[in-house]
Image (spheres, rainbow, N blue to C red):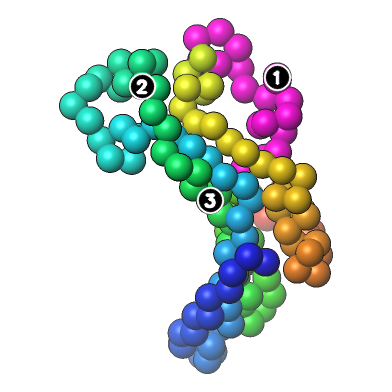
């Protein structure tokens, strides 16, 4: 994992439930400066006309080591968003998506690759339908 930050806290009945929080970068993203810093221009105006992009920013996921197991918070950016032309919709909506952000997600940046390098086994939890009723 790219970086690790240790956090501890006490819950009623259990000491140190959260053992550590690890930050995993799943690539980078560039966005228009108007997005994070604001502007007086109307949204679609700056989105369609801005030619400036921020420096690459990390797209992070977080692995929380809890006393009862690992918790994955956010999964980062899907690599298919940069490799599959059909990932985003077409037409005007696709144009908006294309103008919103520029992602860079290499094969080594995927969540699966990052967790594998850290020797964390990724598992998918599928709740039973009765759990939600």
Among numbered discs 2 and 1, the one appearing first in the sequence: 2
Q: Is residue 79 magenta?
A: yes
Cα distance in 3D space between marks 3 and 2: 21 Å
Residue 87 is a magenta residue: yes
**Where's the N terminus, which quadrant?**
bottom right
Spot occupied by residue 64 in the image (x, y as percentages of width and height)? 60, 70
**Label 2 vs label 1, nearer the camera:** 2
Q: Badge 2: how crowded within 10 Å, few (<14), some, or many (20+)?
A: few
Point 78% across, 64% down: residue: 117
Residue 11's spot in the image, x, y percent? 47, 84
Cα distance in 3D space between marks 2 and 1: 24 Å
- The picture places residue 109, in percent across and down from the top left corner, at 70, 50
Tell me what residue is drawn at x 42 percent, y 32 percent: 53
Which residue does the numbered mark 3 point to in the structure image? 58
Q: Where is mark 2, residue-wise?
A: 50
Residue topped by disc 1? 86
Q: Counting residues from the N terminus, which is met first, the one under dot 3 or under dot 1?
A: 3
Region rendered in magenta: 77-94
Q: Give the quadrant of residue 18.
A: bottom right
């Amino acid at each position: 994992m790219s970086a690790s930050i240790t956090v501890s806290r006490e819950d009623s009945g259990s000491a140190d439930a959260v053992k550590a929080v690890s930050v995993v970068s799943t690539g980078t993203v560039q966005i228009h400066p108007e997005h994070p810093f604001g502007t007086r221009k109307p949204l679609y105006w700056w989105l369609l006309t801005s030619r400036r992009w921020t420096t690459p920013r990390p797209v992070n996921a977080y692995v929380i080591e809890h006393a009862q197991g690992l918790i994955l918070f956010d999964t980062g950016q899907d690599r298919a968003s940069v490799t599959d032309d059909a990932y985003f919709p077409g037409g005007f909506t696709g144009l908006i998506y294309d103008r919103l952000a520029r992602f860079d997600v290499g094969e080594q940046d995927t969540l699966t690759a990052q967790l594998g390098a850290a020797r964390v086994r990724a598992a998918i939890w599928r709740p039973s339908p009765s759990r939600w009723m």
